[in-house]
Image: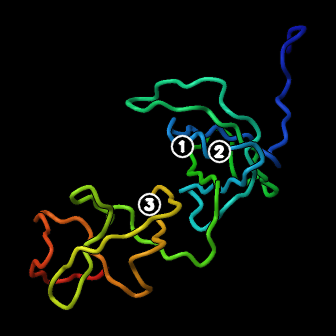
Amino acid sequence: FLSPGQAVAKVGRIDKVRVRLYVDEPEMGRVAPAMPVAITWDALQGRQWQGSVERMPTEVTALGSRQVGEVISVIGNPGGELLPGTNVNAEIRSREAAGALSIPREALRREAGETGVFLLQRDRVVWRKVSIGISSITRIQVTDGLSEGDAVALPTDVPLAGGALVRPVFR
């Protein structure tokens, strides 16, 4: 039997869910309401949900060693597959460059105050200064200094220098 005022059931709709996104403080200036958000969940590989930024942070707080703002997004979930309370991966698209040339972020280096990459030329690497554009957590756009098909060196255990002899391993 139930007591007066005791809940019988919880009723809710999950065709749209609110997702809290913790955005690093330096990145918050690039985020604005209504920007598109894409969500993935490791439990359902290959599935993606779309939504948008609904509310911006009102303060910056510590999250481990990071300073973050809590961005609230609304995500469409018509099949109800995305469950409340799950940990998800999120991407907020602040800018987009269709057809842009990009490289892995870790390939970008600073040498003598210049931004560049070590470019593979046969069995050696050469220093190449590059100009960069927009970036994501894992990739960065190269606007000048590289061409489609150029191979760049990723970090290794051995420090690289221009002209160094290498044995490339492509991944």
Furthest residue to the top?
Answer: 4
Split into 4 quadrants, where in the image is the C terminus?
Answer: bottom left
Tell me the crowding category of disc 1: few under 14, some 14 to 19, or many 20 or more residues within 10 angstroms, Cα based. few
User: The residue tagged with tag 3: helix, strand or loop?
Assistant: loop
Residue of label 2: 31
Residue of label 1: 27
Residue 40 appears left or right of 108 = right
Tell me the crowding category of disc 2: few under 14, some 14 to 19, or many 20 or more residues within 10 angstroms, Cα based. some
Furthest residue to the front?
Answer: 113
Split into 4 quadrants, where in the image is the N terminus?
Answer: top right
User: The residue tagged with tag 1: helix, strand or loop?
Assistant: helix
Residue of label 3: 138
> Where residue 82 appears, x then y in whole percent?
69, 51
> Where residue 150 appears, x then y in whole percent?
36, 85
Residue 108 lies in quadrant: bottom left
Rendered residue at 44%/75% (across/down): 144
Q: CA distance from mark 2 to mark 3?
A: 18 Å
User: The residue tagged with tag 2: helix, strand or loop?
Assistant: loop
Q: Are marks 1 and 2 in contact (CB under 8 Å)?
A: yes
Q: CA distance from mark 1 to mark 2?
A: 7 Å
Q: Looking at the image, which is closer to me, 3 or 112?
A: 112
1 or 3: tag closer to the N-terminus: 1
> Where residue 57 appears, x then y in whole percent?
65, 30
